Amino acid sequence: MGAAPRFMAAKARPLPVLVLADVSGSMGEPREKIDVLNECIRHMLDDFATADVGRGAIHVGVIAFSQNRAELHQDVVPAAEASWTDMEAQGGTPLGAALGLADEVLRDESAVPARSFSPTLVLVSDGMPTDEWEETLDRLLDSPKGSRANRLAVAIGPDMTEQAKAVLRRFVSDEANGVFEAHDIGRIQQYFRWVTVTVTQQARSTRPDRAPVLRPDDLSEFGA
């Protein structure tokens, strides 16, 4: 009689989360903005690393953009393998470079495999882009993974202009969410808690590709 067949557990499908973080000089004025952003991302990574997500495996990467360039500050890896180093605020706001790099990351099968669930992109900014961004945004939105991504945006600070907010509105994937306005530090923390909770729930869901929706401007359940 032959040996009994072996059944291997199905490998969890990646659920990628990519944060596009504006770390221009204005994010350091006051210093608390960049400090809180670093703290929020660090806590998000820790929470994802310890979350029980069932079928999904949350992978996280962070693109930092400042001066005249964007860089992959944190490679896209399983959350438990991430090693966070704080970002520093300096220079301009090269959003176009960040969008171009995000497009490259999503097209890279070694970073975001074809079998991945729809990625979540979180764009965080406090000002107007200082480079050309429209063509790179169109390319990202036309790409297979970028077009189906859950794209969220946070406008930081009370001085964000309507023109700058309009740029973020072009980025978001769901009008129900719109652009979240974090006028104070506490709201940044609340928003990242919401992202953490909803992405974790998404990974546990029977429909992980369904986009999370932020209910009408009420994050009270996520604390101050």
Image: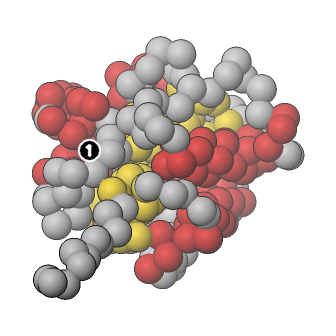
The answer to whether 190 is drawn above or below residue 41 in the figure is above
Residue 176, given in percent of the width and then of the height, sits at 53, 16
Residue at image x 85%, y 45%? Answer: 223
- Quadrant assignment, res 76: bottom left
Residue 88, given in percent of the width and then of the height, sits at 51, 70
Residue at image x 17%, y 51%? Answer: 114
Give 132 or 155, whichever is nearer the viewer: 155
Residue at image x 15%, y 84%? Answer: 1
The answer to whether 125 is drawn above or below residue 20 in the figure is above
Give 161 or 101, whichever is nearer the viewer: 101
Q: Give the colour scheme of this rendering.
A: secondary structure
- Quadrant assignment, res 141: top left
Q: Is residue 183 left or right of residue 110?
A: right
| Residue at the farthest front position | 1
Whether residue 154 appears in this view of the structure is yes
Residue bearing the label numbered 1: 99
Task: Count neighbours of disc 1 (C-alpha within 10 A) and say few if under 14, some if 14 to 19, many if 20 or more.
Answer: many
The answer to whether 82 is drawn above or below residue 217 in the figure is below
Q: Is residue 37 left or right of residue 103?
A: right
Q: How many marks?
A: 1
Residue 113, given in percent of the width and then of the height, sits at 19, 57
Residue 197, given in percent of the width and then of the height, sits at 65, 47
Give 132 or 48, whichever is nearer the viewer: 48
Whether residue 129 appears in this view of the structure is no
Residue at image x 53%, y 32%? Answer: 212
Residue flagged by tag 1: what amino acid is it?
Leu
Which structural element holds mark 1?
helix
The answer to whether 203 is drawn above or below residue 81 in the figure is above
